[in-house]
Each structure stands twice: as C-alpha cells, then as structure tokens.
Image (cartoon, grey):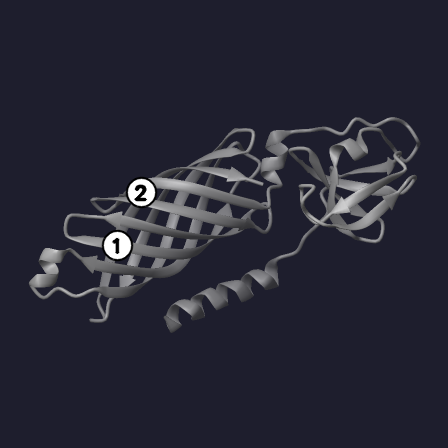
Amino acid sequence: MNKIMSLIGFLCVALACSFSLDARSDDVVVKVVEQYADMHTGPASEFPVFHVIEKGETITVLKSHTNWYRVRTGDDKYGWIAKKSLAATLGLDDSPIQLNESNFESYVNRTWEFGLHAGMLDDVTAMTVSGAWVLTDNIAIEASVGQALGNFSDNRFWLVRFQHYTFPEWKLSPYFTLGAGQIRTEPSATLVQSGAESRTNDLLEVGAGARYYLTKNFVVRAEYKRLTALTERDELEELNIWTLGLSVFF
C-alpha cells in the first residue's frame, strides 16, 4: 500500500507544479442591468449565496451550465448566477449583449463527471462506477470502484488515475490514463473448502480510451486498461479490462 500512496503523492506534486489556470480568450465581460444579482457557490439555488452583485457592476462570464452562469467579479470572486438574473445584460459600451449558450462549450468547461461502465476483466464480466474532477482542459483526476463476478472468484477493485485529454476541443477525443489502486479476490465456496484464501493486491494502471460528446450533459466512453497486480510472492500478474460506459457531466 505504501508503494501506491507514494506513486499517488508523486503524481499530485508533479501536477501541482505544472498546473495553472489561465483566463480564456473568449470570456465575455458584461454589465449587470438588474437591481442586484445573487452569487451562489454552485449552479443551483440550493447552494448558499455568498456575494451580491449590484446594478452597474461588471462581471466576466466564464461558462454556462443548464440555467446558470459561472462568473468572476472585478475583485476576483468566483461563483454562479442564475440565467434569469442576467436576462438583460449590457456590454462595456452599454450595447445589448446576447450571451451564447452551447452544450458542447459546457462539456469542454465541465468540472465534475460521473459514469457507469460495463465490460470484461480478462474473461469475466465487470461493472464499474466512476467520478472525476476536471482540473484543466487536458487533465482530470478520476476515482472508480468495480466488481467482476466469475465462476471461481469475486473480484472487487478500486483505482485512482490521472487522465490526459489529447484534444479536449474535439467531440471525439482520445485520452490516456495512469493510476493505482487495489484488488480484493474472494474465492468461491468450493475453492475455500479446498484451501484457497482471499487475497488483496496492489494495482498499477496504464490505459487509453476515447470519449464522444453525445448530447446535452452526456458522454459515451470506450476504454482499455492494463492492470499490473503486485502479488505477495513478488510476482507480477497482468490483467486486461475493456469497458464501455455513459457519463454525465456538470
């Protein structure tokens, strides 16, 4: 387990050193026309209001999500405003502005993604669920848990990986993964009676996949991962997993 945590820590430090957020060149600066606009911590009314933007104040619209806009104020406060609060907006020259809405643009600028995937772990059917935090246009951190039920054993596994999107602006985009985790193997009752024991092994992962923006907030993903299990006998066991899944993003 120490090997796994060391690898994850190294990857986190490497990412932190190289990661920076730059303003997008196509950000839109608008002037608020309503008497005030509530700024929420997230894209829903259930998120708390932490700042109020007054009439005449200028803000930068960063991206849209369903009925909300993510914005930045002049003093670098970041938050979400309901679209109805920006129904009437003006440019810096007081000319009317129509804010563009694009589902694909929301996909490119997504922050969270959750998925359900089915496939094969070697010759055994496998199901996994995943959740990802998108850090930049090209990099995301994803965690997944899965189960593969065979005739002779029950395998449960978890993985944490870095994903690199080669061409994030494409609707059909390849990506690559590097990660680590663990697998727990429980032998069937018949094998237990014959002396087989449960075992837990660390995993290392390299993989590749392709994702296709489907519609609205949905993405289809096809993925292959090569898993290396580090056994107690200091031997390496290679596993192959193929999956096809559907993800929803926010």
Query: Residue at point 30% right, 40% down?
Result: 119
Numbered label attached to residue 115: none
Q: Nearer the viewer, residue 35 or 19?
A: 35
Q: Is residue 229 left or right of residue 87?
A: left
x then y, percent, for residue 2: 39, 73
Callout 2–callout 1 Cβ contact below 8 Å? no
x then y, percent, for residue 183: 30, 59
Q: Is residue 227 left or right of residue 150?
A: right
Q: Quadrant of the N terminus?
A: bottom left
x then y, percent, for residue 182: 34, 61
Task: Name the front one of labels 2 and 1.
Answer: 1
- Gap in angstroms between the C-alphas marked 2 and 1: 15 Å
**Which mark is first along the chain, 1 or 2?**
1
Query: Residue at point 67% right, 42% down?
Result: 43
Q: Is residue 89 left or right of residue 115?
A: right
Q: Nearer the viewer, residue 114 or 91?
A: 114
Q: Is residue 64 above or below residue 197?
A: above
x then y, percent, for residue 214: 50, 29
Q: Circle 2 sits in a helix, a strand or a loop, which is it?
A: strand
Q: Amino acid at mark 1?
A: Asn
Label 2: how many residues lie within 10 Å, few (<14), some (14-19) or many (20+)? some
Q: Amino acid at mark 2?
A: Trp
Q: Circle 1 sits in a helix, a strand or a loop, which is it?
A: strand
Q: Nearer the viewer, residue 121 or 189?
A: 189
Q: Nearer the viewer, residue 175 or 218?
A: 218
Query: Residue at point 67% right, 44% down?
Result: 46
Numbered label attached to residue 242: 2
Label 1: how many residues lie within 10 Å, few (<14), some (14-19) or many (20+)? many
Per the image, the residue denoted by label 1 is: 155
Q: Is residue 109 left or right of residue 89?
A: left
